[in-house]
Amino acid sequence: MASEEASLRALESLMTEFFHSCTTNERKREIEELLNNFAQQTGAWRHCLFFLSNTRNEYVMMYSLTVFENLVNKMWIGVASQDKMEIRSCLPKLLLAQHKSVPYFIRNKLCKVIVDIGRQDWPMFYHDFFTNTLQLIQSPALAQLGLVMLKTTSEELACPREDLSVARKDELRKLLLEQVPTVLGLLTGILETYWDKHSVIASTPPPSPTSGESVELLGSLFQGSQYSKLLCQPMAALDSESQQLCCLVLECLAHLFSWIPLSTSITPTLLASIFHFARFGCDLRTKHKTGPFISSNSSSSNGEGSKEDRARLGVLAMTCVNELVSKNCVPMDFEEYLLRMFQQTFFLLQRLTRENNAHTIKSRLQELDESYLEKFTDFLRLFVSVHLRRIESSPQFPIVDFLALLFKYTFNQPTHEGYFACLDIWTVFLDFLTTKIKSRLADRESVLDRYKDALVLLLSEVLNRIQFRYNQAQLEELDDETLDDDQQTEWQRYLRQSLEVVAKVMELLPSHAFSTLFPVLQENLDVYLGLQQFIATTGTSRRLNITAENDCRRLHCSLRDLSSLLQAVGRLAEHFIGEVFAARFSDALAVVERLVDVTCYGSQTSLYDLETAVPSVLKPDLIDVHAQALAALQAYSHWLAQFYSEVHSQNQSQFLNLITSAIDASSPLITAKVPEKLLLSSCHLIVSITSTVRPVFLVTLPAVLNIFNLITTENQTHRLPQEAHLLVCRALSNMLLLPWPNLPENEQEWQTRSSNHASLLTALTREYRILRGTVNITPRQPALDNTVIQQTLPVLRDIVDSISGESTKSRQICYQSLQESVQVSLSLFPVFIQHPDVTDEMLAFFLTLFQALRVQMGVAFTGQIIQTFLNMFTREQLAASILQEGSAGCRVVQKFLKILQVVVQEPGQAFKPFLPSILSLCMEQVYPVVAERSSPDVKTEMFELLYQILHQNWRYFFKTSVLTSVQRGAGEETMENEAQFIAAMQAFGQSFLQPDIHIFKQNLSYLESLNSKHKLYHRKLFRTSMLFHFINVLLQVLLHKSHDLLQEEITLAIYNMASVDFDAFYSAFMPEFLNGCQGVDTSQRAVLARNFKLERDLPSFTQSMQRLVNDLRYYRLCNSSLPTGTIKL
């Protein structure tokens, strides 16, 4: 005894020293080793039992419990049965004796250790484990302890970790499910008892007229429901201890609901009790309505729990509700319960959105606990996304009243995040409605009529919310500078989500949405168009004569609103085209004419150039409105294209005027002096007109000729910014290359257009082509050459890219114009091989050429290019580039491999002679460098190339024709290039032994694809010498859980490989695999083999495989934790 006392004192001082701030890391490691060695001793648990009973030191208690936890979870199988009995008897006694005196985290840890024992031994050796917990819950003094035990049991036994066999996991779930009705009955009893006990006290004083408790229910939400009276009872006034107990009950229920199936065990009484507590979240009695003379902390005098505890009860109750509502699988006999739950929740929603004299709805919501509101919004989202289709047609559920409440709830949210979450719910609802209408075209009108009022209200309110005119205070809080993960600011996200809702309503109510939006747009446009009269010119400067602070503020708000409304109008463009083009033509025409007017006005008056009273605010506003007007007009390019094709013969002049004005509005902005935002908007508009609308007369417009001259005569000093330059070149090239719509081939004027295109490209590549003659002769400045290359090649690449999907004629003309530049590039390539940035740009250009114009380039020239590349990329060059991960050199190798992918995919025989050298580059030069490194980017491209070589050139390896395979049977495949095939397969196999999960997933899918397209797994060579190796590697990956996210894909691949010859898999591979398994004994191997059923269908095979992996890991875990010399019976 004395020695144990001494050990305890020593342990206490060690623990205190360990956690002391002055202890060095070195000393901490020494203490840790000492403690670990102590814990490993046989019988250390006896000392720990003594320590637990005799110490007040929390560190010592925690250490002792960790020793027990380790013993139970890792060494239990080797503990003598007598010792197990002693531990099972001592620990619960210790818990009962000390649960009140120790800190809560020690109590919870002790509960967890006891539950862990139950997990191993209940019911066979620990038959009273669960009944003890139930008895604790039923004893008032120990109920709290019982609930902690119950919650821990639910967590540890219902969803156990992998340290149990599958059979035991199934047994535990079955045992627990048998107990569920009893447990739920007990928990319901506690909730009811506490509610009733405290309600009686609370209901004695008469209800005050402002409390709103007894006000009649609004609408028809649940007339005749037996629960309406229940929910109108006054709130219970729980004391602090009762609140804690009820919190624990709700926590238990929330966890139970996460795994038990919906069934009638979840009784109406239980649901009603949960909803009683959910009311705490929307109850505003945070401050007692006492006179001013009573001190504010008087609420504690009657022992009532704090505001935070009351809110927590509400949050936990809503968590329970959400667990139930998130289940999509609803048995028939539970549907009525669901309806009842929804009625009860909407009673709460009514309470949340009810206005009374004391509070507006928004201030009510503001005073509630944030977590409660989040849970409530989650509930509404789950209801609309999962259950609305079930409930919507029920006569007992007044859907329109519900939408009215949801509307109030949405537009009174106290935070932006809350508002976004509610907008998401409306989006889901609008999608549901759109789908419903599409599937029931016959009664479309009646469905729409039912919801029309709600949609009209929603539209006008969302539109008001994005306007400063109605919502300035909130909108000014939004950040418009910091970008989030989606590369948008808070303000852009707000506007985008709002406009998505507007667009979805537009789809359902097009004419109404248009007639709501257009007048508001007109109103703000009038302000903008009226600014001309305030422009004063003195000498060269132009000034906006609006200086009063109030006027500037009003103008700022109006311009911001105009910018948002222009985006809204642009977002709706898609609802005017296609089948509805004719029906909505006049509306769309009105919009487009307005937009053309605005853009012309903006460019003519050059509002972006004005001096203003508040330049930091008004100047960006004027630029933004102008840019948004151009962007909105661009959004209607598909409508203009349809206008051109359907009515160009009748309304030629109307169409001509629109296009001419649009070009006139954009062309003056194409200069380096204009702010970039505006410049880019005008460039994008011109690109859309040339690529989507393609009017035949475009090339004759004076404004277009001006742009042409500007681009072809510009030099380094007067050059447009690169992005704008690129867009303008694309537009001019499109205008000359893309076929004109509605015209036959012989009227396309290809001859003229071809020579114009050639002169355009000659001008664009003037400086680039000069490089070929001078680069080797004179020691020029490489920086200048690099600039020319890096400015010219992206433009050429973009031009090629934009016609890659077009007709042969367009591609022919493009290649003719480019021919000289391509040859220049090829001759410059070796000169710049040591400049990765330049090489990167060149290879990007060649990659685009190969993808779009390889037919036009012809076999001979393409071959020359490939040969040049193969010669230049020596092994040393490749290795040096690959080793600098993420560098330009690395990108060069990636692009080179991408070019080779295009080459090996080319059908026909033209490029087949290159296959051996491509394969050898891949396997002998690139692969050895990346094999042992992570190099994810290069590896991805290299394996893609390897896959394409195998897939597109299968007959390079397997010559067998269909006829010979039928004649000879599959037994005698003729194989060529066997060594390269084996090397490729080894590379795939090797990648499965490495940690990179993306490469693993990609390569597994490549093997599966080769199997489905070419029967890879059935080929003799693969079947006899590789199949079992691959299955073994994949099984080991499952066992190590290193790529757990790919569990399904790996199991499917194993199944496909095994199904080539199930008999051999079960009779030869599995026994050999189990015999080779480390860390299990013979009897365990026999159990594993017995449980691995000879299944041949995928679902059963998958189940068997999961069981094998789980149980093998479990046995290894048990065996590795046994003390040495343990004898197992």
Image (cartoon, rainbow, N blue to C red):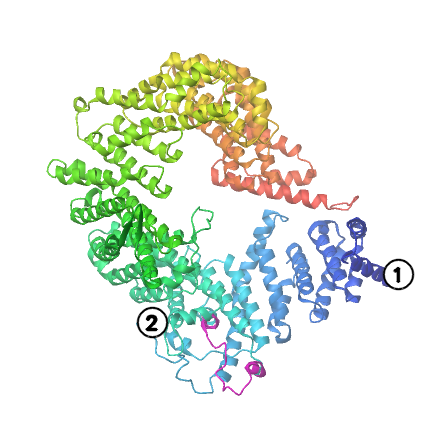
- Tell me if I can see residue 601 in this picture: yes
Among all residues in the image, which is located at the extreme right?
2
Q: Earlier in the sequence, mark 1 or mark 2?
A: 1
Task: Tell me: residue 220, above or below residue 655.
Answer: below
- Asked where in the image residue 366 lies, by quadrant, the reply is bottom left
Along the viewing direction, whichever of 38 and 1081 lies nearer the viewer: 38
Task: Tell me: residue 501, above or below residue 715.
Answer: below
Tell me the SS state at disc 1.
Answer: helix
Among all residues in the image, which is located at the extreme front?
539
Along the viewing direction, whichever of 54 and 352 lies nearer the viewer: 352
Task: Tell me: residue 641, above or below residue 349.
Answer: above
Q: Magenta residues?
A: 275-301
Q: Residue at x 40, y 66 (%)?
A: 341
Return the residue at label 1.
Answer: 3
Along the viewing direction, whichever of 525 and 242 lies nearer the viewer: 525
Horizontal and vertical percent for residue 1109? 59, 41
Q: Amino acid at mark 1?
A: Ser
Tell me the SS state at disc 2.
Answer: loop
- Tell me if I can see residue 973 in this picture: no
Task: Tell me: residue 745, above or below residue 776.
Answer: below
Residue 222, numbered label = 2
- Asked where in the image residue 673 lies, by quadrant, the reply is top left
Other residues around mark 2 within 10 Å, as few (<14) / some (14–19) / many (≥20): some
Residue 738, numbered label = none
Q: Amino acid at mark 2?
A: Phe
Tell me the distance, in whole angstroms, between the alpha carbons under discs 1 and 2: 72 Å
